[in-house]
Image: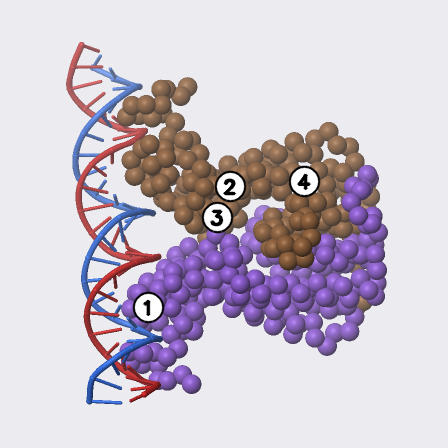
Chain colours: A purple, B brown, C red, D blue
Amino acid sequence: MTPPATGYHHGDLPNVLRAAAVDVISSEGLNGFSLREVARRAGVSHAAPGYHFGDVRGLLTAVAIEGFETLHDELVRAGSGIDDPIERLVAIGRGYVRVATEHRAHLEVMFREDVIAADDLRLAEVGLAAYGVLEATVAAVAERYNPTLRIQDAARLCWSAMQGLVELQGKFAVLDGLAAEASSSLDDHVERFTTLIVNGLLHDTSPTRSPRRRR
Amino acid sequence: MTPPATGYHHGDLPNVLRAAAVDVISSEGLNGFSLREVARRAGVSHAAPGYHFGDVRGLLTAVAIEGFETLHDELVRAGSGIDDPIERLVAIGRGYVRVATEHRAHLEVMFREDVIAADDLRLAEVGLAAYGVLEATVAAVAERYNPTLRIQDAARLCWSAMQGLVELQGKFAVLDGLAAEASSSLDDHVERFTTLIVNGLLHDTSPTRSPRRRR
DNA sequence: TGAGCATGATTGACAACGTAAAGATTGATC
DNA sequence: GATCAATCTTTACGTTGTCAATCATGCTCA
């Protein structure tokens, strides 16, 4: 399939470039990212990325798509084989932050709508697929434990909490440092967050629709 | 105080530049941000920002600090005069997303540690101050409603959920669009999130420390 | 008053960047 | 074996961040 990765016609440049882009983001941060550096690491001319991906936005969008794909796959994997919906939900939460930390370069791009082509079709597809895994699990929780649970709200809360945790992790570490506490690991946070959230989901008796709860 | 904003010595350039920076981020996004454009809008030479803020990182750090200051002030304001801790917590949540949306340019910078000087002392101070408002409120909730509540975890969950909500808002809107639903407003999300979270906090009977909950 | 000086702002230069256009190289097709 | 499309390179241009050098201004102290 991949012809010798040498010579004028590389044969697999798009993939190599995408990997190189991830590499650059990992080492230089999204800030120090540059198409020319990507080309350098891939050993091609500085205009090669432009040919395959149009512009920097195109390349980063490809990285984001890849990120959502592995996110989806890992969420499915994390939840597979677990019967109890709640345990499955917790496992998915763990999976989310694991993917986020192990593929930080991807994550750094996935939700940066000012940097990627947010209207890309494939991007929307894979993003929706990943979210679907979460929502299905929440639906299972609702079905077994609390039929009145508003699935959409609950799923979005879970997503937001995990995403916020990932983003604020640095700040939390600073807080722990100030308090001279043993720095709580990311996993610990996931554990405690999900515990609290699940409590909320189980005891949710939200009103049918909107009437704002007074006390 | 501010001498005539003309002539060689401007007198108030740092503030003007900071405001111009916010302006640029608002209109061009953090991506299209450039020191030279800031200088252009402020009507000064292209190197003027460099003189006052060192480099782009310095200027953006100043913007972030300003953001945390207004965040702190607004959180205090949002919670003031509300007796019930839970209502106060909800009000603070609303205040958080309000600041985040009304000062999107600031927010776009406040948590981007790759773009600002994350080790800046003043930045850490104002960030901690803002967080303190939240934690104090959660502590009040615990004291009145659930003394066993682990304040730190609860506060961080609230923060994460709101921050995640702000960041994922765009995705949620897409989801709503696909479902042909009336696009849920940000405020609605805040309301539902806080309802769920508060449920969790009130019913929290977390084990003293770590033993993972089986079921 | 006015000379000296620190401060505030500008000018000019340079390397790096993104991107577009034009050119070079290869594999495939007939 | 000529043609052609696809792939990659070269060249070029405008923009950017940052530095050093320079210029302009107000303050201080004699």
Q: Which amino acid type corresponds to the residue marked 4 in the rendered image?
A: Arg
Q: Determine which residue is flagged by label 2.
A: B106
Q: Which amino acid type corresponds to the residue marked 2 in the rendered image?
A: His
Q: Determine which residue is flagged by label 4.
A: B94
**From mark 1 to mark 2, how far is it between C-alphas?**
36 Å
Front tag of 1 and 2: 1
**From mark 3 to mark 1, how far is it between C-alphas?**
35 Å
Q: Determine which residue is flagged by label 1.
A: A48
| Percent position of residue B15, x then y | 42, 31
Q: Tags 4 and 2 in contact by the CB under 8 Å rule?
A: no
Q: Secondary structure at mark 3?
A: loop
Question: Is label 4 on the same chain as label 2?
Answer: yes
Q: Determine which residue is flagged by label 3.
A: B118
Please indicate, yes or no, whether residue A101 appears anywhere in the rendered image: no
Q: Which amino acid type corresponds to the residue marked 1 in the rendered image?
A: Ala
Of the 4 image quadrants, the one containing the N terminus of chain B is top left
Read off the chain for label 2.
B
Question: Is label 3 on the same chain as label 2?
Answer: yes
Is residue B138 found left or right of C5 in the rendered image? right
Does label 4 or label 2 sit earlier along the sequence?
4
Question: Is label 1 on the same chain as label 4?
Answer: no
Of the 4 image quadrants, the one containing the C terminus of chain B is bottom right
Q: Secondary structure at mark 2?
A: helix
Read off the chain for label 1.
A
Please indicate, yes or no, whether residue B71 appears anywhere in the rendered image: yes
Q: Secondary structure at mark 1?
A: helix
Q: Residue at horizontal 50%, vertical 50%?
A: B112
Q: Tags 3 and 1 in contact by the CB under 8 Å rule?
A: no
In-front residue for pair A19/B121: A19
Is residue B166 found left or right of A192 in the rendered image? left
A157 shown above or below B15: below
**From mark 4 to mark 2, how far is it between C-alphas?**
17 Å
